[in-house]
Each structure stands twice: as C-alpha cells, then as structure tokens.
Image (tube, rainbow, N blue to C red):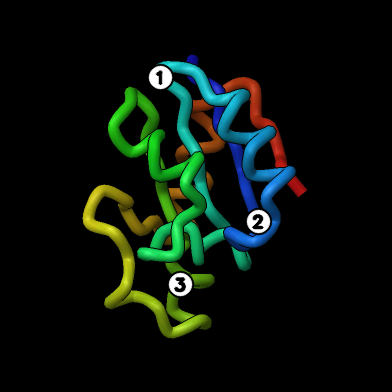
Amino acid sequence: MSTLHILNKAPSDNTLILSCSNALAGGDKLILIEDGVYNATTSIHPALKKQLNSNIEIYARQTDVMVRGIKTQIISDIRILDDTEWVALCVESQPIVSWY
C-alpha cells in the first residue's frame, strides 16, 4: 500500500508545503483539498511542481475546485477526484498523513 498525503494549504504556506513535499516518496499519492487545490493550478508551489515529474500521483478534490471556480486552471497532470473516488483512495492507502 502507498501513503496518501492530504494537503489543505494554499501555495503561500511555504513551510508546511515544503515539509509535505519532502515527505513524499515514490508511489505515494497526494490529494489537494480546501485551499490546497490552488496548488493544482499554475500557482502551484515550486516544491510540488517538482513532484509532477516523479512517481507521485497528485489529485485535487472536485468539490473544492468547483467552489473556487478554478476548474479550467487545473494543470493537466493533476487528476480531479469526486468524493466517492477520494474515499476509495483512502481505503486503498495506508498510512494516511494529513498536512494541516
């Protein structure tokens, strides 16, 4: 099983995002929720942008993307997940690490 990381901070939260990015390992998954979905746009934090070319899967929560009106700004390498898909991702991942 891979580790699922959950990040809810905007690109401006430098310290937390750097800590999260440094904790990611090959095969891990990262889901961006709440203000974290801004990291799925061209405003992505540089540390997370580097992860796009690695063996890390990055997702954005659909509800949060829609509420913020940024669906057309989502980077093509980041997949949007609905809540059912998010729950499935949680079930198949262990451990789950929340970055708040």
Name the secondary structure under disc 3. Answer: helix
Please say if 34 is above or below 17: below
Marked residue nearer the N-terminal end (1 or 3): 1
Q: Residues within 10 Å of mark 2 (few under 14, many from 20)?
A: many
Residue at horizontal 29 percent and vertical 59 percent from the top: 75
Residue at horizontal 32 percent and vertical 51 percent from the top: 78
Mark drawn on residue 8? 2
Marked residue nearer the N-terminal end (1 or 2): 2
Task: Specify the amino acid type for callout 3.
Answer: Val
Marks 2 & 3, CB-CB < 8 Å contact: no
Residue that carries the numbered disc 3 in the rendered image: 65
Q: Residue furthest right?
A: 100
Depth check: 55 or 13 in front?
13
Real-space CA distance between mark 2 and mark 3, rounded to the nearest whole angstrom: 12 Å
Please say if 5 is above or below 38: above
Q: In x, y percent, where is residue 94?
A: 59, 21
Name the secondary structure under disc 2. Answer: loop
Q: In x, y percent, where is residue 7?
A: 62, 48
Task: Specify the amino acid type for callout 1.
Answer: Gly
Name the secondary structure under disc 1. Answer: loop
Residue that carries the numbered disc 1 in the rendered image: 27
